[in-house]
């Protein structure tokens, strides 16, 4: 990392140590803490509920800090994961130095650091979400010789008491500015905090959803990230959720990532853009058009897309968002710039002229401009078990790259326009549909389990435990049962308002 990159990087440790996080060592962390009077260290890790957990350490000596950084600490796995038995529940949480960042909310200098789980033998816990994702990433590289990269789009609602001043317009909040956008300042504050924590953010904006109900105002926002390695892509979303909720508490408002807030209003998704790189080059485009590699990956993800809902859409209200004639998908197909499909191929600067030169009187772009092309899985939502969801998508990509007839299948599943237009009526009859409830999602996961168990990515017990958890909701026919029942819908939303 050169001096200019250090200067532009907002992470406190990068600024001080003058090196990229992936090169942080234990000695770097010790020196930073000692020379910056760090008084507390927090170990952070994700449990099966998807939320960030915390173990606090008051630093009494350099020797003690060295010990916890070297050895980690014991935790009770049975209270973190439902499938771990209390009789043999001890696990280790071991810090990963590259994830260290200063806590933006603590009144005393406090270092946060993300951890990995290890079992009693000192091996990585093969059922932990982070390890499952690492296994998937490794398998992708082994089978393809390529690197898998992805980014998330995190949508959320801010909920506050209704205000009369500069009211927002119903379902017209997309890219709104203040003062009509009430919580732009909160969003930008979160983005700055997340950048200091190491997050690589593409942009933030207000989203479509804005409405009033029962004296409360609901305003939807989105933060989108840059393409990175899968584990980093997931963990910056998890940290972003934590930061947004902490800020919400300070602002005196609620922040919700729930998939559905009320009937007839925009739900919140958690979309994932994906790409593959070979020798550092994006291979989603060839000769100016979508490559065969991209199409094979898309077909594989479509083939498992219904099963991915078992980790990407984990609560009953998830399936109240996945309804026809909305921007959320229901039929398993793909298309360009089409928001009603499972996989969308967005604009990727492939067919454009040099727009900057046109806009800026002759400014020329770099001749070696890298491709930004991605494709987007649009089904998952804020209830997602994020590590496992991305691992499933990688499994699907591997599956597609090895699938016979994948390119023919890609042609068969392609929709060039709005699939709910009359011209697509016969096309829809040929398509599979996404699950309509958690119970159905569980059945599909088990039916397709071999794709996820390949290369020992998902342990059998994890898949079975997830299916059992989904089945326990007993939500078959839920949408029909509560249709038109505003009270039942509201009670269900409230139950899952702070999921994941």
Image: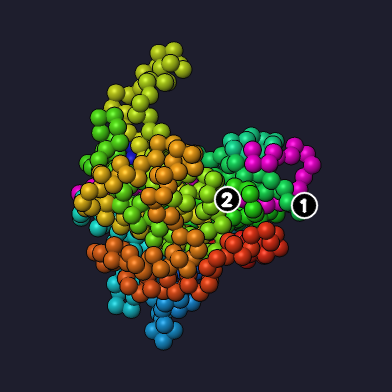
Q: Give the mark nearest the N terminus, 1 or 2.
A: 1
Q: Is residue 487 above or below residue 414?
A: below
168 is within the stretch colored magenta = yes
Residue 202: x, y in percent?
46, 40
Q: Is residue 80 left or right of residue 117?
A: right
Q: Is residue 305 left or right of residue 162?
A: left
Q: In the figure, 230 relative to 289: above or below?
A: below
The x and y percentages for residue 483 are: 64, 59
Which one is in front, 462 or 249? 462
Residue reaching furthest to the top: 361
Report the residue marked by disc 1: 215
On the image, the x and y values in percent for residue 150 come to: 37, 47
Viewer-proximal residue, 246 or 41? Answer: 246
Q: Which residues are magenta?
A: 145-172
- Taking depth in this image into account, of 20 and 260 the one nearest to the observer is 260
**Where's the N terminus, which quadrant?**
top left
Q: Secondary structure at mark 1?
A: loop
The residue lying at 54 percent from left, 68 percent from top is 475
Tag 2 residue: 267
Q: Residues within 10 Å of mark 1 (few under 14, many from 20)?
A: few
Evaluate whether residue 479 shows in this view.
yes
Q: Nearer the viewer, mark 1 or mark 2?
A: 2
- Give the spatial CA distance, label 1 vs label 2: 20 Å
Residue 156 on the magenta span? yes
Q: Residue at x 70, y 59 (%)?
A: 486
Q: For the residue labelled by badge 2, is the local secondary structure a helix, a strand or a loop?
A: loop
């Amino acid at each position: 990392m050169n001096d200019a990159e250090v200067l532009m990087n907002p992470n406190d440790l990068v600024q001080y140590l003058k090196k990229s996080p992936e090169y942080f060592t234990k000695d770097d962390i010790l020196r930073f803490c000692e020379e910056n009077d760090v008084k507390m260290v927090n170990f952070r890790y994700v449990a099966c509920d998807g939320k960030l957990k915390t173990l606090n350490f008051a630093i009494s000596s350099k020797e003690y800090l060295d010990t916890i950084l070297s050895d980690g600490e014991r935790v009770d796995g049975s209270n973190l994961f439902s499938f771990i038995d209390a009789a043999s529940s001890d696990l280790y949480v071991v810090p990963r130095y590259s994830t260290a960042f200063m806590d933006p909310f603590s009144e005393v200098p406090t270092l946060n650091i993300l951890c990995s789980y290890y079992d009693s033998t000192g091996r990585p816990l093969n059922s932990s979400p982070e390890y499952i994702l690492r296994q998937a990433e490794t398998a992708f590289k082994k089978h393809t010789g390529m690197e898998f990269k992805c980014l998330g789009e995190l949508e959320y609602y801010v909920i506050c008491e209704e205000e009369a001043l500069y009211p927002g317009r119903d379902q017209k909040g997309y890219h709104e500015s203040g003062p009509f956008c009430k919580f732009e300042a909160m969003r930008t504050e979160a983005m700055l905090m997340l950048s200091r924590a190491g997050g690589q953010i593409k942009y933030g904006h207000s989203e479509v959803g804005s409405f009033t109900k029962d004296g409360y105002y609901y305003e939807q926002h989105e933060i989108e990230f840059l393409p990175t390695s899968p584990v980093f892509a997931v963990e910056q979303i998890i940290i972003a959720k934590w930061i947004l909720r902490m800020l919400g508490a300070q602002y005196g408002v609620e922040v919700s990532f729930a998939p559905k807030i009320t009937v007839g209003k925009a739900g919140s998704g958690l979309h994932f853009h994906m790409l593959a790189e070979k020798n550092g080059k994006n291979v989603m485009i060839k000769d100016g058009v979508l490559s065969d590699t991209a199409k094979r990956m898309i077909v594989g993800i479509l083939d498992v897309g219904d099963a991915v809902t078992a980790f990407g859409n984990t609560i009953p209200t998830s399936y109240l968002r996945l309804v026809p004639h909305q921007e959320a998908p229901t039929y398993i197909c793909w298309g360009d710039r089409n928001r009603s499909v499972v996989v969308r191929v967005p604009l990727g600067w492939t067919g454009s002229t040099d727009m900057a030169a046109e806009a800026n009187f002759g400014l020329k772009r770099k001749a070696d401009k890298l491709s930004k092309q991605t494709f987007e899985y649009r089904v998952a939502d804020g209830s997602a078990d994020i590590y496992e969801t991305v691992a499933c998508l990688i499994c699907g990509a591997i599956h597609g790259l090895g699938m016979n007839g994948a390119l023919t299948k890609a042609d068969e599943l392609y929709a060039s326009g709005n699939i709910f237009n009359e011209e697509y009526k016969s096309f829809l009859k040929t398509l599979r549909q996404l699950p309509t409830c958690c119970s159905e999602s569980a059945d599909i996961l088990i039916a397709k389990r071999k794709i996820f168990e390949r290369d020992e990515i998902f342990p059998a017990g994890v898949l079975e435990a997830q299916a059992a958890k989904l089945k326990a909701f007993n939500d078959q026919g839920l949408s029909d049962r509560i249709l038109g029942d505003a009270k039942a819908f509201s009670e269900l939303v409230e139950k899952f308002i702070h999921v994941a």
